[in-house]
Image (spheres, rainbow, N blue to C red):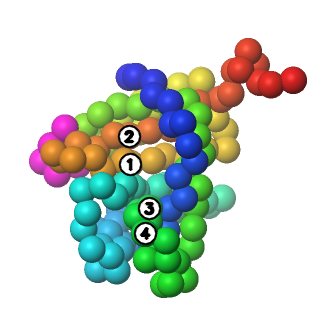
Amino acid sequence: METIILDEDILVYCITATSFPDGVQKAHEILHGLLPFDVHRKYFGLSWPDPMGNIIYKAAAEELHRGELSKHHLETKKIVKGEYLCIDIPDFMDNIQAIGAAFQQLIHDNRIASDGFCIEWYLPQDLCRCMVKMQESVFNLKI
């Protein structure tokens, strides 16, 4: 487990999966159908439990050019800047179960923020970075 720092907020546009885990792939397919693939674009999966304990999952991507995704009137979410705990999963398509195992480890760490969500950041070369936001340290708060 490592920590990384996001220096800026990332605004992402989302497609909600009809179910979890069965609807995840279809949500990503719909999202990718709306925009051209670009190695410079950031792609994500966002998830969290609803009050009934079901997992809400959203395939998400950032805009590279203003208006390319906002014209589709998609839901937006903000991945907020700050410190994140993360576990990298190389060749994730060959080991999808490792993503769930990574999040089980991450969400049981007592340093995570209670209002965050699980983030899959899909990086080049089939790397999935599993991330959860950390609580802000009282030493980092500005007074």
Q: Is residue 20 visible to the viewer in this orientation of the structure?
A: no
> Badge 2 local density, few (<14 within 10 Å), some, or many (20+)?
many
Give the mark, 1 or 3, whose residue is nearer the N terminus: 3
Label placed on residue 120: 1
Residue carrying label 2: 130
The disc label shown at residue 62, or none: 3
Write the start and end of the magenta stretch as one range. 90-96
- Label 4 or label 3, whichever lies nearer to me, is 4
Residue 118 point in image, percent of width and height: 48, 46
At label 4, counting other C-alpha atoms closer than 10 Å, the crowd grade (few under 14, some 14-19, many 20 or more) is: few
Residue identified by numbered label 4: 65
Q: Is residue 126 visible to us here?
A: yes
Which badge, 2 or 4, comes first in the chain's sequence? 4
CA–CA distance between discs 1 and 3? Answer: 14 Å
* Residue 108 placement (x, y as % from top left): 52, 29
Q: CA distance from mark 1 to mark 4?
A: 22 Å
Do the CB atoms of the residues marked 2 and 3 lie less than 8 Å apart?
A: no
